[in-house]
Image (tube, grey):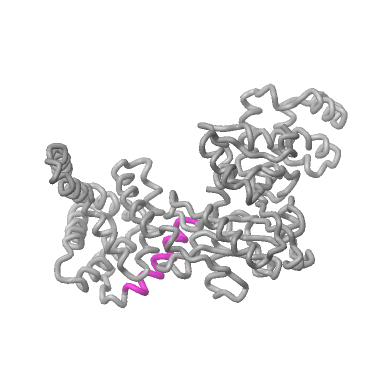
Amino acid sequence: MSDIAAQPQETLWTRTVNSVRRVWLDLGATLDSDAIPAKLEGKAADQLLERMRACIASEGGEVSARARAAQLGQYYMGLDAPGRKRFLEILASNFGPDKEKVETAIEAYHHAAPEKKARARQDLQAVLTPPRQSLLTQFNALPDGVKFLVDLRAELLRYTKESPELADLDKDLERLLVSWFDIGFLELQRITWNSPAALLEKLISYEAVHEIRSWTDLRNRLDSDRRLFAFFHPRMPMEPLIFVEVALVNGIAGSIQTLLDEDAPIVDPNAADTAIFYSISNTQRGLRGISFGNFLIKRVVEELKAEFPNLKAFSTLSPIPMFRQWLESNIAEGDPNLLTAEDRKRLKKVTGNKFGKGDLLRSVTTGDWVKDAELSEALRPALLRLCARYLVQEKRKERPLDPVARFHLSNGAQVERVNWLGDISDKGMRESAGMMVNYLYRLNDIEKNHERFAKSGFVATSSGVRGLL
């Protein structure tokens, strides 16, 4: 989606293993570590296959079925990464839909009499449901089983490109997660400095848009003129699915350095006229493809309007994560429209030499231009124009190249302002040559903007951005 926070894969998995193992021990399903092989080959693979069949058969009542599922889950968690991949391959290749039964059911549906059509359709749906879905559902029924499956899918996503069978398993699991994580089941919560320490630690870990550098930094982001909201699922009460950080200010902010300055005076939130959404972080990689961000923003706007009636504007201060990559690529391809005659004239006056695309590439790549006030000011018109062009005009399949732009524009925002040197951190310079952008959610225009973007890819822009172009 947009401003995504990414956890290191092994850190995620280790956290899940430690949490789930503690809970599943209470099920009386302790698994001897000697039962977990070093490699899933030959006899070990056959034994695993039998374990899976026993779980799917669900014999012996609910308690026995839960214990077998918990043991199988512990077996999976005890494997190393190659072993877990092999586990998933065995599950995918042996417990998909029976092709012959599917063909027979399709034929029966086509030839069914009208009064028997509904039953034939039900029979077809039944044989299309893979047996492995039963096993996945059994995991879901276990304590912390939902989190286990979310992180299992995060691992699964690593392998889907190289294995079609694993891609099919991923789709099965994704469909289940979509139904379990319907927006109607989610709870919006405000997180404060008084929230549990374990939850605050997770915020520090999950935030990757603008790194939380210390507990003091986090406290600043949770002060009286700040708000942090997150969606939670009832089955994952201490795991935020997505969270947004908001600053209550006067006027639209254009610099993340200023916004996150720990020494800046606190604004009276009741006197603020603008809410700035400056970080939106998805936290669960295993929920990729399940969108919560658009619902989160709308819910948070409602919460803020109710708490602070004086708020008049709702805007983001967003990164532009692929701008520099696009710029360098266009320079390498020899795009003749990057620098205008005025740009070249202005830059020659500062540098004393003819200034071409190669000089622009060197300037952007080294980043030294930020320290040279004259060169920086000379580059400013060109880089602002090129950034506006990238955000508004550069598209693929009628949609903006920039992923953050796609997210906010599809939600009905407009490109309001491109901010010069809005983020001069190492990451900001590396990704966007220091640029940031405001997407403005003008409440009366949201539905219209959304519909125009959905139909034709139309990008709503302010007069200021149009002026840059």
* Residue at 32% in and 72% down: 24
The residue that appears at 33% across and 51% down in the rendered structure is 85
Give the camera-side residue of 16 and 241.
241
141 left or right of 50 in image: right
Quarter assignment of residue 272: bottom right
Q: Nearer the viewer, residue 23 or 307?
A: 307
Please state, as top left, top right, bottom left or bottom right, where the C terminus lies in the image. top right
Pinpoint residue 231: horizontal percent, then vertical percent: 50, 63
> x, y (%) of residue 236?
43, 67
Q: Can I make out residue 263 in this image?
A: yes
User: Which of the 4 image quadrants contains residue 376?
Assistant: top right
Magenta stretch encompasses residue 214: no
Q: Is residue 16 magenta?
A: yes
Residue sitting nearer the eye, 129 or 433: 129
Residue 208 falls left or right of residue 174: right
Residue 384: % across, % down: 74, 37
Counting the numbered discs, the total is 0
- Left or right of 193 on screen, residue 108: left
Q: Is residue 362 visible?
A: no
Give residue 9's position: percent from left, percent from top: 45, 56
Residue closer to the observer: 119 or 203: 119
Specify start and end residues of the magenta stretch as a single range: 8-24
